[in-house]
Amino acid sequence: MNPDIVFSNAVLLTPEEMGQADRLTISGGVPGIELMERAGQAVARAAAKMVPAAARISILCGPGNNGGDGFIAARCLTAAGHTVQIHLLKASETLNGDALEAFVRMGLPHTVVPDGDGIAVSLAGELERADLIIDALFGAGLDRPLAGPGLALVKAVNRSGRRVLAVDLPSGVNGATGADPGAAVRADATVTFFRRKPGHLLNPGRTLCGSVTVADIGIKAGVLEKIGPSVFHNIPELWLGDWPRPDPLGHKYTRGHAVVFGGPMSATGAARLSAGAALRAGAGLVTLASPPDAMMVNACHLTAVMLKKVPGAEAMEELLADRRFNTVLIGPGYGVGEETRAAVAAILKQKRATVLDADALTSFPNHAQELFTLIGDNPAPVLLTPHDGEFARLFPDIEGDKLVRARRAAERSGAVVVLKGPDTVIAAPDGRAAINDNAPPFLATAGSGDVLAGISAGLLAQGVPGFEAACQAVWLHGEAGREAGPGLIAEDLAPALKAAIRALVDKTAGG
């Protein structure tokens, strides 16, 4: 990966890493209260865009630095002519450090949130009359379920039906995992600082944030070199340097030859979807290798994709003796069982870049270590593309949030793991991970995953490294879904890739 990526906007910081960024900046000579001033002013600017002039704004402030941001925002919004009501979760005597300094600078009347049911009685009416509620209670650092007055206050905010702006992250959402272990604020917009956090992209956190704005508060990108982040937002900035630009002097044989192994006549569609997607993703040639009984039905549907009769694992070895087949995909519609395990073993022993999807994963629940050993002996990149059900069968003992599960699975298997879903996580064995957020809900349709597997194979065939190929494939898959739009079926996705690929070609023109 390009070292410049460490300094890019693709970086995601855990709450702990963000705290480190703050400390490094402060130790470098920038006072913490100055960072808080800039953060609070950014919140005030975001709030002003959400309300009319002279609006009524309720600001809920917690006992830590998130509350301090709220105090600064309250002062700025009051100066701008808005009517601001400030509510502290705890008495001001409990404040310290920069939050206390921000409170003193605010110099405005405030109330303290009462315990118990009094919250509903004393604040419900005011919250319902507000033009905007600013949630400055806890932010990204909370790693436990809400309780007591904080929980009651969050429930009151959600019941109010008013627009909500969250500071850093909606209170109740875990900044590292996106988890909502109890109740969390449902925000319309969120202002975070310096870099996004994983919780902004992982569900359910992503659905609770609304639109996310990243504010510059004066932290220099150079601190990232000391932090060494390893989690990224899956955007082109992350992998554009590895995008396979066609060589003006190249030809189809220099762009790789992917082979997709398909199943019997009764289950041919999935492999055809994969093969077509591999070709559309840029592989110079694609061959669909299938059992003899499937040849005729595949021939009736395919034109640019070539066909090869391959009756079993032994024939696979003979086919792959031709080193021009540099990438292999097996799984979509192939069938589940011992024969599939034998086929996967035969493929991996040929040491090709490989994508294992669908049936190729489902065939190994009781033979996972055998699979991982084969992957470890293959120097070429291997991608595993499970959905949650397939993941649980292949890695039954790996638990935790989605990011943790994907990373542990990649480390154990030696493969790049693409843990699919609305918030797909791509994890490499070396610890790098990326979180995707551009997939529309219409992609939840039969055959969609087969297309993703094919895109991955097409990129590997062109020599893209494993992690980058997986990231590119997931992003392109999402963009194709957006291009195809509501009502899409899997057959729409490969043609829709053209617009997404054209945009990337335009970005890299002259590069």
Image: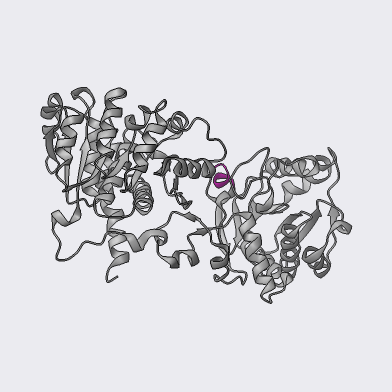
Whether residue 466 is visible, yes or no, is: yes
The quadrant of the rendering that contains the N terminus is bottom left
Q: Position of residue 373 (x, y in %)?
A: 38, 37
Left or right for 54, reference 445? right
Q: Which residues are magenta?
A: 203-208
In terms of depth relative to the viewer, which is nearer, 30 or 396? Answer: 396
Q: How is the image coloured?
A: one colour
The residue lying at 18 percent from left, 30 percent from top is 314
Q: Which picture quadrant has residue 274?
A: top left
Q: Position of residue 295 (x, y in %)?
A: 12, 29
The quadrant of the rendering that contains the C terminus is bottom left
In this rendering, is residue 143 above or below 75?
A: above
Decide whether the magenta segment is chiefly helix, strand or loop: helix
Q: Which picture quadrant has residue 168?
A: bottom right
Whether residue 168 is visible, yes or no, is: no
Q: Which picture quadrant has residue 334?
A: top left
Q: Position of residue 398 (x, y in %)?
A: 53, 35
In this rendering, is residue 56 above or below 301?
A: below
